[in-house]
Image (cartoon, grey):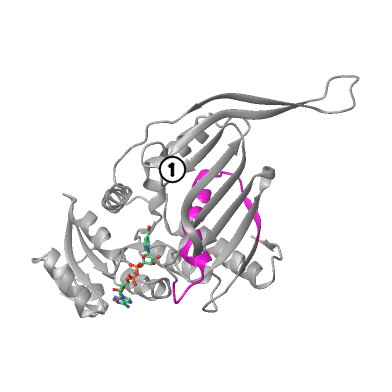
Amino acid sequence: MIRMGVIGYGYWGPPVARNFHSLDECELAVISDRRPDALRRAKQAYPSVQVALDPADVMSSPHVDAVAVVTPVWTHYELAKAALANGKHVFVEKPFTSTAAQAKELIDLADRKHLQIMVDHTFLFTGAVKKIRQLIQDGTLGSLYYYDSMRVNLGLFQHDVNVIWDLAPHDLSIIGDLIPDKPEYVTASGQSHLNGLENLAYITIYFENRVIAHVNVNWLSPVKVRTTLIGGEKKMLVWNDLDPDEKIKVYDKGVAITKPEGVYDLLVSYRSGDMWAPRLEQTEALAAEARYFVECVLKNQKPFNDGLAGLRVVEILEAANQSLKDRGRPIEL
Ligand SMILES: NC(=O)c1ccc[n+]([C@@H]2O[C@H](COP(=O)([O-])OP(=O)(O)OC[C@H]3O[C@@H](n4cnc5c(N)ncnc54)[C@H](O)[C@@H]3O)[C@@H](O)[C@H]2O)c1
């Protein structure tokens, strides 16, 4: 049994609290938020759970084994550091920290104290990403060529981070999980039109072996789009996360280049075969992730979405931000 404290009960805190609360091997011990109205909502949902205005009460409580940090990104480092320093395991929201240096410090602290860090890269626990991971690992797609994602909608404008820090962590965590090749450099361009923070951006990541990833993020789109194309040597797929029934379609399409003897021009042949939509697991991603966190803590085992996975996302975010400021200059990773 682990006893969980949740810090931050705004938009994402409630589903985090609900999922930890629903687990047999976990007790939701305390919820903390700086805002009294948030604590009133928490008390209504969980009358027997303790609430605290000051997160320090959670950190110092002998009745808490692990802390979920579900507050804005600029607060993650201080709160996670205090939790680790007090001997608590940490489940922290994406993006892990505001800087790579902060992430490294937290990883080091957790290692020294033999504590676990899990970064909430929720998408990695969805049926869609699990299926794509399987299609890559079992060789169905063949060697990867590209990952191309469009994650756009109207709002919600953030006041503390630009659109890269808000929307790109999802794709960067998925890319880090799916693409085994080493990322080499990043370029990014974008523009701010309203509040000084970039509201649209185009990020390109170049990997070894000529794998390339592109992520288009935008808060100023008239329609919501969550579509990713993944191209492999053998097959290609389209993942439309907004499609309720057939989120993933795998196409048996491809191109073969041949250079027959005696012919100087390359011959390009196109293959256009069947399309199929695989069945996906339907469980709530956050439920699977919360269960996995508790399991990792109880077994004293490092999760695959650990602090290092969080650090890799933050490093690319930092590099993309740098490139954006330098009008698309390639930044080495
Ligand atoms: N994994 C996902 O899919 C996903 C989805 C949404 C948000 N998030 C992440 O969750 C985090 C929170 O986002 P949100 O949309 O819930 O924000 P929010 O602003 O709606 O809620 C944050 C809450 O934290 C409280 N808070 C802030 N600083 C605090 C402190 N020092 N101590 C105690 N409480 C404090 C605020 O009062 C607020 O109620 C962000 O890091 C965001 O990126 C992740």
Percent x, y of residue 325: 65, 73
Residue 176 inside the magenta-drawn segment: yes
Q: Residue drawn 61% across and 50% down?
A: 213
Find disc 1 in the rendering and name its residue. 129
Magenta stretch bounds? 158-187
Q: Quadrant of ligand 1?
A: bottom left
Image quarter of residue 67? bottom left
Q: Residue drawn 52% across and 50% down?
A: 176
Q: How many numbered markers are drawn?
A: 1
Percent x, y of residue 119: 39, 58
Percent x, y of residue 66: 26, 63
Residue 112 inside the magenta-drawn segment: no
Q: Is residue 66 visible?
A: no
Q: Is residue 175 left or right of residue 204?
A: left
Q: Residue drawn 56% across and 65% down?
A: 200
Where the N terminus falls, by quadrant?
Answer: bottom left
Eyeballing the image, is 131 above or below 185? above
Q: Secondary structure at mark 1?
A: helix
Eyeballing the image, is 185 above or below 73? above
Residue positioned most to the front: 222
Residue closest to the eye, 266 or 52: 266
Q: Is residue 218 visible?
A: yes
Amino acid type assigned to the residue bearing label 1 in the image? Val
Percent x, y of residue 152: 49, 58
Eyeballing the image, is 221 above or below 41? above
Where the C terminus falls, by quadrant?
Answer: bottom right
Q: Is residue 248 left or right of residue 71?
A: right
Q: Is residue 319 left or right of residue 42?
A: right
Residue positioned most to the left: 48
Question: Looking at mark 1, is its residue's CB closer than 8 Å to ligand 1?
Answer: no
Residue closest to the eye, 299 or 319: 319
Eyeballing the image, is 262 above or below 91? above
